[in-house]
Image: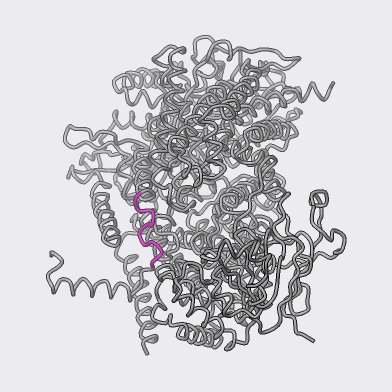
């Protein structure tokens, strides 16, 4: 009965969220920056959660996320560019050699799948490495992937180092939210399953996990591949959001940004990653943008403000979080209805006793 | 015919130029409680690590239920470096990873407790069941293994109840007091449904009272789950009270074996070991 | 001879850039040896040294600005360690690495803000910026000078580590962090010294590097930094001679690859090399094997 | 305790939102009639230097003409400047922020890739964009909202190929382009087509983002016996290439497109023996009345604003992109006047018929939205005094 209640509340809340989004799309002008934040935030939330699955839950410090997103984005873009647009996109390669254009609904899972296959192959040698060596090797692989995709000889497929564009994109916020929602739900289910426990065991203590009969290689490979699958889907969504995609944009910096999102949200917290990705995107794309412009209050020019100042402020905030709130917003906890309810109840109880100043 | 569950044959473990286990041979019969004792650095834990697949022995072989689970001979650089015995007696190389060994039914605890600290007590025990569940990542994720999951949860709760750990079920393992952490580690090992249980200094850091109850507990566990127990221990009263037989190691070599009384009266053992570490 | 003639410029460039990588790689290898930390900010400290040279030499004479740049870089390296790494000494390794990434992000963004993202011309340092002809290839004096200079500095460093008290302390700490702390070694001062040495070499490397590649940009440090790190891993992290060897090898290989027309893969090659070495010999060429105690 | 800290953190971020919201539409305070022109340019990243010079032209133009009369009422023209960070993944968000600031038209960007990346954002919002210097054909091809005031790469590539053949009797050219840069790859490709079309041979190589060692590339050019090196790259790479070419003393002339028309190049070439030629849209020594007045007034404006001069690389040399930025702004204002409205759609429609005599030549748009251009200026960097030397006007043979 209690379980049923929980499910019902969850469904109602999700419905409410989508109704709210729909309502927002009606009320606000489509140009509102809120939508940029919501779209990009949702995409980054997916990628951050997928990275968290690997770094936070399995304890594998991988820095290959940008590379996997790149594969996903390219797979999606290459497979969905309409035939009639190919001549224009592949202008230096006589329209390319990919003979088909798939519908979006097929291309997105396929983007994840192709990424997962690559990740599987990369994982075979790389996952034997320990902590920082793994980090640097995955970082290296991301760079290699980028170089290969930019290679001229592959031009008929990848368009060399040039932009891919004119593939189907989304305009409504609903789409990225729906895809991200489904994907994160699957990840959460996985984390709470027996496999999720095994991943956490590996994170806590590899030797003990092995002594409990958990095959390290198999489970690490599993986590790596699944994480990359969702990173690939995230990449496909990012490609859709950007409307054009180019390998050179998927640099190590992108991985670092996602890593910082995970850290700010709390390593090992799914809800933390989601919250922080929206905050991160909102700060970097919207709220802090005013720092880039010189502002006059009367005749007084506010000092320091100018192009680039936003990023300085932003990185200082990040450093403060890393140094002083190293557990991030959520730590390893999850934001749950129950937790929220209990938190509020405790507060109101305290209030009754007069402990909390109003 | 005796029923050996575990046999070690001429096992030698050499790190660089140092011999940690020297031509060690021992047999453990089904249902026995066997103790492995010896001064610090005698190679006891190394023996455990060889059995559980953490280390690859340099030479010799280990049989578990009549099946070879580890076998090796000096190779590569070791060929020149090797200073142990029986250099050419073994030709096969068999190696299993620790998880494979665990799946075969050998569970262990660790000298320096290795619990999954940030996970709850319940999760710690559940993890040990993971390898026995009939599932794959899809059925597990999409909850198609619900019956299986229900069953193991029930089993684990029962196990925790038996160990008096039920009240701590949802607490993180690291929040338990030391004695309970030891008990949880044994519970976790039991949850993996072993036939052979290796205990690495289970009584370390316990007072005489606790040690006594632990001794009873070990015997109880052996009887209830029809286990064979192989333990390393420094508490001599515990060892003498519960062991069927005792092996004594010194500098990697076996210097004696026999029943507790035999060992107590063995001069070499007393010289090498007992006189020094009695008070431990 | 024909082969030599055509490939000489690549080899020269490779040796030169290899020497510069080597100077950065030592910083990585020393820090990693002691803290087990990939100091992602090291490449950016190298870049900052370049910018400081640009700004200082604009108002000060060279004989004053060069030592000042080295001094300030050392100070920066020291401060980075004190502010961003020291508070995390007890934290898990992942957090300190994340902090390193954060510092790198911060330094780059600051550089962007200060320079407004514009590339700056590195000042011309007399004599070493002059052109010389080696066999038939024309190049700058600095190209020839770099390997000599690098080897000299490395020799001095090795002497320092072998024969001084602080060197002994550094070796002890890299061998066993906890024990040496118990033995009364002042861990913090050893770590600071490591960062100071690393930054000093990075500053020297920076001056040599930017004399050759005359433009400084805020991201100029990240690629050389990563490559130097790969060199350090290649040679076996913690080993100075390994890092130097690895750096020269990477420098020469990447230039030869460019010479062969595989330019798209010149960076990728470095990483491929890294992955191959990590898999074949996880501890690098001269690294020591370590075993986890169970 | 941790929770409380977390809550406070979130709270403070929410407060920041409020701050952000109130400050984004900076123009509201005036209360009068305001029309906004978006400036979508890089002020950081690889193209930061060029982007800043383009912004300078636009800002100067805004200083010259800052009101426009619509329906008899004066409207103040306000610039909304965003930094697209020279990056195709940051670009769309930057463009969105212009859209949400309710711009009537936008100008941008330096760099074709970022222009293409933001194109759809502007199209979906119905905002017309005028590209000052994005020369890749794909920017305007197949859409009706993107315009540009400069010439196109196929034209520029052909002009330079002609120049190489005419002036140096070049038979073999070495082409060096940057990976992942549409401008670079495109221009390189058009040069190659034109050059091989005239019977020449080419050797092509490309380099990665962030590469700073060009000695190996230059060595290849020498080994291959190239007569000219064509390197359409960003100015960051350019100064490295020039510096390293000079130190290797390769003795092969360097040719490049419009991006190299920058004081960065002059600094790099100064004091060396390296010959550098660029094709460009505008020359400081332009003796037309409009051109020379622009040059003098722009320089005066720069000297009054030390901060602006700093963005120009600390000198008074007028970059062609500044002139193009100026023209793009003026064209946009012209369209607003014709449309008689601040409505983006109306401005878009009006742009098709705009005719404006700009400092870089007369501007009117063809069916793709490209300004009709027939000639390019060729300039050479003067190695001794660090100025541009006008070489000639080159057309297509």
Give the quarter of the image for residue D238. top right
**Residue drawn at the location 47% of the way across and 72% of the way down:** A185
Regarding residue B244, the answer to whether it shows in the image is yes
Quadrant where the C terminus of chain A is found in the figure? bottom left
Colouring convention used in this rendered image of the protein: one colour
Instruction: Describe residue B178's horizontal placement relative to residue D280 as left or right.
Output: left
Instruction: Describe residue D53's horizontal placement relative to residue B141 as left or right.
Output: left
**Residue drawn at the location 27% of the way across and 49% of the way down:** D20
Whole-percent x, y for residue B129 in the image: 57, 79
**Nearest the eye: D21 or B181:** B181
Q: Which residues are magenta?
A: A324-333
Instruction: Describe residue B71's horizontal placement relative to residue D28 as left or right.
Output: right
Quadrant where the N terminus of chain A is found in the figure? bottom left
Regarding residue B129, the answer to whether it shows in the image is no
Q: Is residue A326 magenta?
A: yes
Whole-percent x, y for residue C82 in the image: 39, 38
**Nearest the eye: D304 or C18:** C18
Q: In the image, is residue B74 above or below residue B228?
A: above
Whole-percent x, y for residue D106 in the image: 38, 43
Q: Is residue A109 magenta?
A: no
**Residue drawn at the location 62% of the way across and 63% of the way down:** B273
Whole-percent x, y for residue A196 in the image: 52, 71
**Nearest the eye: C244 or A212:** A212
**Nearest the eye: D267 or C179:** C179
Q: In the image, is residue A118 above or below residue D319?
A: below
């Amino acid at each position: 009965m209690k379980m049923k209640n929980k499910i019902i509340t969850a469904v109602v809340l999700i419905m409410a969220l989508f109704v709210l989004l729909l309502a927002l799309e009606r009320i606000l002008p489509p140009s509102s920056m809120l939508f940029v934040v919501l779209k990009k935030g949702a995409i980054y939330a997916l990628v951050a959660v997928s990275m968290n699955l690997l770094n936070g839950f399995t304890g594998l410090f991988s820095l290959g996320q940008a590379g996997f997103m790149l594969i996903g984005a390219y797979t999606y873009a290459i497979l969905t560019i309409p035939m009639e647009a190919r001549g224009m996109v592949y202008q230096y390669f006589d329209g390319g050699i990919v003979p088909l254009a798939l519908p979006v609904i097929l291309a997105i899972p396929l983007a994840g799948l192709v990424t997962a296959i690559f990740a599987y192959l990369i994982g075979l040698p790389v996952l034997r490495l320990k902590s920082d060596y793994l980090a640097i090797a995955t970082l290296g692989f991301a760079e290699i992937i980028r170089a290969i995709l930019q290679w001229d000889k592959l031009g008929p497929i990848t368009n060399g180092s040039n932009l891919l564009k004119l593939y189907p994109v989304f305009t409504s916020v609903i789409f990225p939210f729906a895809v991200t929602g489904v994907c994160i739900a699957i990840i959460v289910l996985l984390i709470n399953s027996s496999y999720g426990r095994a991943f956490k065991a590996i994170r806590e203590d590899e030797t003990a996990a092995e002594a409990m009969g958990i095959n390290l290689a198999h489970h690490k490979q599993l986590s790596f591949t699944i994480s990359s699958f969702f990173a690939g889907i995230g990449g496909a969504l990012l490609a859709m959001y950007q409307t054009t995609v180019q390998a050179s944009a998927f640099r190590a910096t992108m991985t670092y940004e996602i890593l910082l999102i995970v850290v700010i949200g709390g390593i090992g917290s799914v809800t933390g990653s989601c919250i922080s990705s929206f905050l991160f995107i909102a700060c970097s794309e919207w709220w802090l943008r005013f720092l880039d412009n010189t502002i006059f209050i009367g005749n007084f020019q506010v000092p320091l403000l100018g192009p680039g100042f936003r990023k300085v402020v932003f990185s200082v905030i990040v450093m403060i979080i890393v140094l002083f709130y190293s557990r991030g917003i959520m730590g390893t906890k999850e934001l749950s209805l129950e937790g929220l309810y209990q938190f509020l109840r405790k507060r109101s109880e305290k209030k009754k006793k007069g402990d909390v100043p109003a | 015919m005796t029923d050996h569950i575990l046999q070690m044959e001429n096992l030698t473990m050499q790190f660089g130029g140092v011999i940690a286990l020297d031509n060690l041979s021992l047999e453990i019969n089904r249902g026995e409680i066997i103790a492995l004792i010896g001064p610090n650095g005698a190679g006891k834990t190394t023996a455990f690590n060889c059995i559980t697949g953490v280390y690859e022995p340099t030479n010799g072989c280990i049989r578990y239920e009549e099946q070879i689970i580890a076998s090796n001979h000096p190779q590569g650089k070791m060929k020149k470096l090797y200073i142990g015995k029986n250099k050419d007696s073994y030709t096969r190389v068999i190696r299993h990873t620790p998880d494979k060994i665990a799946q075969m039914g050998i569970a262990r605890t660790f000298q320096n407790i290795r619990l999954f600290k940030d996970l709850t007590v319940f999760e710690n025990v559940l993890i040990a069941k993971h390898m026995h569940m009939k599932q794959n990542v899809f059925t597990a994720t999409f909850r198609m293994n619900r019956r299986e999951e229900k069953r193991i949860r029930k089993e684990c709760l029962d196990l925790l109840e038996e160990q008096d750990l039920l009240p701590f079920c949802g607490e993180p393992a690291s929040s338990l007091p030391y004695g309970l952490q030891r008990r949880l580690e044994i519970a976790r090992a039991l949850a993996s449904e072993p036939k052979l249980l290796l205990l690495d200094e289970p009584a370390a850091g316990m007072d005489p009272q606790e040690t006594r109850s632990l001794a009873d507990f070990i015997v109880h566990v052996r009887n209830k789950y029809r286990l064979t127990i192989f333990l390393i221990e420094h508490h001599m009263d515990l060892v003498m009270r519960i062991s069927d037989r005792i092996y004594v190691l010194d500098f990697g070599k076996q210097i004696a074996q026999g029943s507790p009384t035999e060992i107590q009266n063995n001069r070499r053992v007393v010289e090498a070991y007992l006189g020094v570490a009695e008070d431990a | 001879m024909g082969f030599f003639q055509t490939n000489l410029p690549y080899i020269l460039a490779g040796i030169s850039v290899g020497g510069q990588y080597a100077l950065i790689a030592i910083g990585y290898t020393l820090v990693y040896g002691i803290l087990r930390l990939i100091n992602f900010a090291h490449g950016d400290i190298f870049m900052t040294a370049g910018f400081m040279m640009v700004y200082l030499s604009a108002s000060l004479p060279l004989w004053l600005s060069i030592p000042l740049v080295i001094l300030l870089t050392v100070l920066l390296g020291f401060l980075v360690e004190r502010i961003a790494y020291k508070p995390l000494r007890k934290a898990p390794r992942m957090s300190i690495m994340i902090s390193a990434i954060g510092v790198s992000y911060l330094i780059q963004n600051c550089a962007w803000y200060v320079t407004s993202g514009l590339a700056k011309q590195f000042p011309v340092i007399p004599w070493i910026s002059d052109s010389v002809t080696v066999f038939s290839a024309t190049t700058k004096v600095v190209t020839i000078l770099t390997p000599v200079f690098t080897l000299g500095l490395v020799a001095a460093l090795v002497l320092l580590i072998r024969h001084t008290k602080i060197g002994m302390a550094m070796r002890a700490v890299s061998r066993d962090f906890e024990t040496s702390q118990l033995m009364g070694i002042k861990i913090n001062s050893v770590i600071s010294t490591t960062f100071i040495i690393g930054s000093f070499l990075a500053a020297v490397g920076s001056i040599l590097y930017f004399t050759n590649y005359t433009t400084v940009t805020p991201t100029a440090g990240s690629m050389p930094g990563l490559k130097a790190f790969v060199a350090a891993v290649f040679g076996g992290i913690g080993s100075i001679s390994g890092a130097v060897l690895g750096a020269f090898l990477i420098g020469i290989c990447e230039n030869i690859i460019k010479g062969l027309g595989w330019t798209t893969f010149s960076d990728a090659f470095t990483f491929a090399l890294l992955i191959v070495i990590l898999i074949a010999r996880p501890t690098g060429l001269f690294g020591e094997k370590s075993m986890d105690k169970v | 305790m941790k929770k409380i800290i977390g809550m406070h953190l979130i709270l403070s971020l929410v407060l920041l939102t409020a701050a952000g919201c109130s400050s984004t539409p900076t123009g509201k305070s005036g209360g009068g009639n305001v029309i906004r022109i978006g400036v979508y340019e890089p002020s950081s990243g690889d193209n930061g230097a060029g982007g800043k010079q383009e912004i300078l032209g636009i800002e100067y133009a805004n200083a010259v003409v800052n009101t426009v009369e619509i329906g008899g009422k004066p409207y103040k023209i306000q610039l909304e400047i965003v930094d697209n960070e020279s990056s195709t993944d940051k670009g769309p968000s930057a463009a969105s922020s212009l859209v949400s600031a309710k711009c009537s038209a936008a100008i941008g960007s330096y760099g074709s890739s970022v222009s293409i990346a933001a194109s759809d954002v502007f199209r979906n919002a119905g905002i017309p964009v005028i590209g000052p210097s994005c020369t890749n054909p794909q920017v305007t091809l197949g859409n009706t909202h993107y315009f540009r005031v400069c010439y196109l790469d196929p034209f520029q590539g052909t002009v330079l190929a002609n120049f190489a053949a005419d002036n140096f009797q070049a038979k073999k050219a070495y082409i060096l382009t940057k990976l992942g840069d549409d401008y670079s790859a495109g221009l390189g490709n058009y040069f190659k087509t034109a050059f091989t079309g005239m019977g020449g041979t080419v050797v092509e190589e490309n380099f990665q983002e962030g590469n700073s060692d060009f000695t190996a590339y230059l060595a290849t050019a020498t080994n291959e016996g190239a007569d000219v090196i064509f390197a359409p790259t960003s100015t960051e790479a350019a100064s490295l290439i020039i510096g390293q070419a000079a130190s290797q003393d390769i003795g092969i002339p360097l040719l490049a497109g419009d991006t190299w028309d920058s004081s960065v190049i002059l600094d790099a070439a100064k004091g060396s023996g390296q010959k550098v030629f660029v094709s460009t849209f505008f020359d400081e020594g332009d003796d037309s009345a409009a051109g020379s007045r622009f040059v003098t007034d722009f320089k005066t404006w720069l000297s009054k604003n030390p901060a602006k001069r700093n963005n120009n690389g600390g000198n008074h040399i007028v970059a062609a992109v500044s002139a193009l930025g100026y023209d793009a702004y003026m064209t946009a204002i012209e369209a607003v006047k014709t449309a008689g409205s601040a409505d983006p759609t109306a401005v878009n429609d009006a742009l098709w018929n705009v005719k404006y005599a700009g400092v870089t030549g007369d501007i009117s748009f063809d069916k793709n939205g490209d300004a009709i251009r027939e000639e390019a200026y060729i300039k050479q960097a003067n190695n001794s005094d660090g100025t541009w030397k006008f070489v000639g006007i080159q057309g297509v043979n």
